[in-house]
Image (cartoon, rainbow, N blue to C red):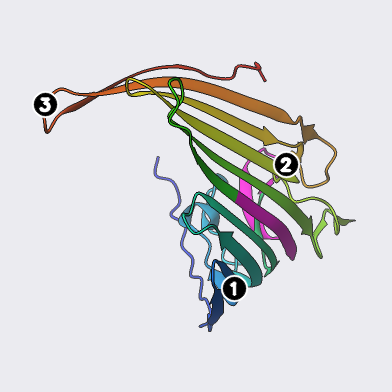
Amino acid sequence: YFPTQEKGTIKFDSEWMPRIATNYEWRNMAWRISYAKGYSTPTLSEVRSSDNIINTALQAEKGNNYEVGYKVKTNNQHLIFDIAAYSYQMKNGILRQVNDAGQEYYSNVGEMNQKGLESTLWLYIPIHSSYIKSVNYQGAVAYNHYRFGHYDVNNEDLEGKKITAVPNWVLSNSIRIALPESLHLNLYHNYTSSSPLNDANTVFAKKYNLVQAKMTWDTKLCTTVGLQLYFGVDNLLNE
């Protein structure tokens, strides 16, 4: 038995992809603004998915991205703060679909509007005490306002629904504490809010916190060879 060989041709139009950005620095502060036009052709697995049909109707994704940002730091760079806001409007967004036989395929669903806010803080605290030498902290928070624009599935208008699998909030923290005798304590925390599991937003994944801890010890075996031993615990909150 020799399966029928599928053949097909997809032609994509030429596209301009301009990017304009500017940055202004004054003392320990910097402002930035940028615009970019995006263009992404579908992958081979999207053109020919599990239904084994070459999807010649699949077109490239297109979008416009606008971003503004601000960054400030201290003279010794022991504290750095960065914040940015962006808006990305995508047309011909490619999303996974499932047919009646349970086979997946991909289609250009229409518009996806992605707006967000991202902020990061770096902090270094030298202590030099008998118990703690220094503390490094890095925290980041992201707000994702990702919504479908014009999007019809099975004659159902999903405009305004949350984009599948994207949480509204993601928060991460990491602390590295330098101890005497080349010991380091590393603590990690990640919070992810609930996110929709389908396009209609009828099923949601629960929010969760992930906490990890790791202790490391570093030493030199010789001038060119080092050794690190570590002990760690994952998912301390069992979420």
Q: Residue furthest front?
A: 129
The residues tagged by marks 1 and 2 sit, at their Cα atoms, a distance apart of: 48 Å
Quadrant hosting residue 232: top left
Location of residue 176 with respect to 213 vertically, above or below: below
Q: In the image, is 228 to the left or to the right of 30?
A: left
Q: Which of marks 3 and 2 is nearer the N terminus?
A: 2
Quadrant hosting residue 169: top right
Spot occupied by residue 116 in the image (x, y as percentages of width and height): 71, 58
Residue 222 is tagged as 3
Q: In the image, is 230 to the left or to the right of 100?
A: left
- In this figure, which residue is indicated by the disc labeled 1? 32
Query: Can you say which quadrant of the picture contains the N terminus?
Result: top left
Which range is magenta? 97-120
- In this figure, which residue is indicated by the disc labeled 2? 100
Question: Within the magenta stretch, is there residue 102?
Answer: yes
**What amino acid does circle 2 point to?**
Asp
Relative to the observer, which residue lies in front, 210 or 65?
210
Q: Earlier in the sequence, mark 1 or mark 2?
A: 1
Spot occupied by residue 31 in the image (x, y as percentages of width and height): 61, 72
